[in-house]
Image (cartoon, rainbow, N blue to C red):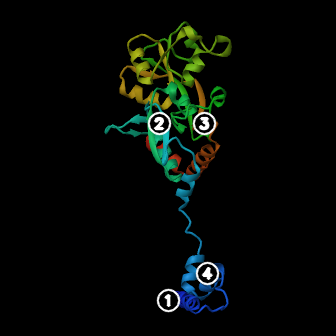
Amino acid sequence: MKKYFALLLAGVMALSLAACGGSSSAPAAPAETQKEEAAAEAPAEEKAEAEAPAAEAPAAEEAAAEIKTVEAGKLHMATNAAFPPYEMISDNGGFEGIDVEIATLIAQKLGLELVVDDMEFGSVITSVQGGKSDIAMAGLTVTEERKQNVDFTESYATGVQVIIVPEGSDIATVDDLANDKMIGVQDGTTGYIYCSSPVEDGGYGEDHVTSYPNGAMAIEALKGGKVDAVVIDNEPAKAFVQANAGLKILDTEYIIENYAIGISKDNNGLRDAVNNALKELIADGSVQQIVDKYINAEN
């Protein structure tokens, strides 16, 4: 750099002398030539520093920059936190459960921070469709109807719909629900879809189904004699029966289904990123560890 300034100063002095003496000396080199000469004479370390490529951003930051979310740096998860052990409110007022922990790991892989948007179950998919949340994760079963509204990732868990009845009930099998019984379900769930379907489609008809905003309210209706049975997923059913004396789960499965994450059909980039992260978590055993943490194999 010192040599560069010395050359520059010498050039200025030469121009000054020429102007005073009226000399017809050769014109100064073009600015581009001067820059090239200065660059050629620059120390090697300065040239290397100038030519070095910009440092690459961390992979997580690059991934986050390429993903479109409703809020920069955040991954909003639409859920209904009344579905233990998949999502529930913790003792400190936060959120916990299988879905919450899996979503947290997915967000970390994408360089994002998880935000839980707690709402009625019936609003979970519409929240994603309307661009208010990024993913729907609420023990969400993959159905053909839902696939028309959102895209789904690979399945990460299996759900089983079961029947809860009071002890001493005359309902002993799935077939007994057809005997003019009133069935309680959570609004918008597959339990509601299956049970309220017409008889010719394997359901019991809407007249024999009462839906509630969440499973806990359906259980209260069962305890109060307003419904004869509640159809709900097996794991929440276990928690409800354990917390409410006088209830039992029938030793029969109503239906088996797969849980997956719902994502807007207009956000293929996020869908692929979330799905890839989920597949990695399944492959390395993280998902199974989380499931095992909340679901005791002996239950």
Query: Where does the image place residue 216, in percent across and percent down from the top left?
Result: 41, 23
Which badge, 1 or 2, is on the more N-terminal residue? 1
Q: Against 201, is 50 above or below?
A: below
Which label sits on residue 2? 1
Residue receiving disc 3: 264
Gap between marks 3 and 1 measured at Cα: 60 Å
Q: Amino acid at mark 1?
A: Lys
Q: Nearer the viewer, mark 3 or mark 4?
A: 4
Question: Badge 4: few (under 14), some or many (20 or more) residues near its Cα, within 10 Å?
Answer: few
Gap between marks 4 and 1 measured at Cα: 15 Å
Q: Find numbered disc 2 in the image and state the secondary structure of the residue it sits on.
A: loop
Q: Amino acid at mark 3?
A: Ser
Residue receiving disc 4: 35
Q: Is residue 281 shown left or right of residue 30?
A: left
Which badge, 4 or 1, is on the more N-terminal residue? 1
Q: Amino acid at mark 2?
A: Tyr
Are the residues at dot 1 and dot 2 in contact (C-beta closer than 8 Å)? no
Q: Find numbered disc 4 in the image and state the secondary structure of the residue it sits on.
A: helix
Are the residues at dot 3 and dot 1 in contact (C-beta closer than 8 Å)? no
Which badge, 3 or 4, is on the more N-terminal residue? 4
Are the residues at dot 4 and dot 1 in contact (C-beta closer than 8 Å)? no
Question: Badge 2: few (under 14), some or many (20 or more) residues near its Cα, within 10 Å?
Answer: many
- Residue name at image x 65 percent, y 79 percent: 32
Q: Nearer the viewer, mark 1 or mark 2?
A: 1
Are the residues at dot 3 and dot 4 in contact (C-beta closer than 8 Å)? no
Which badge, 2 or 3, is on the more N-terminal residue? 2
Q: Find numbered disc 1 in the image and state the secondary structure of the residue it sits on.
A: helix
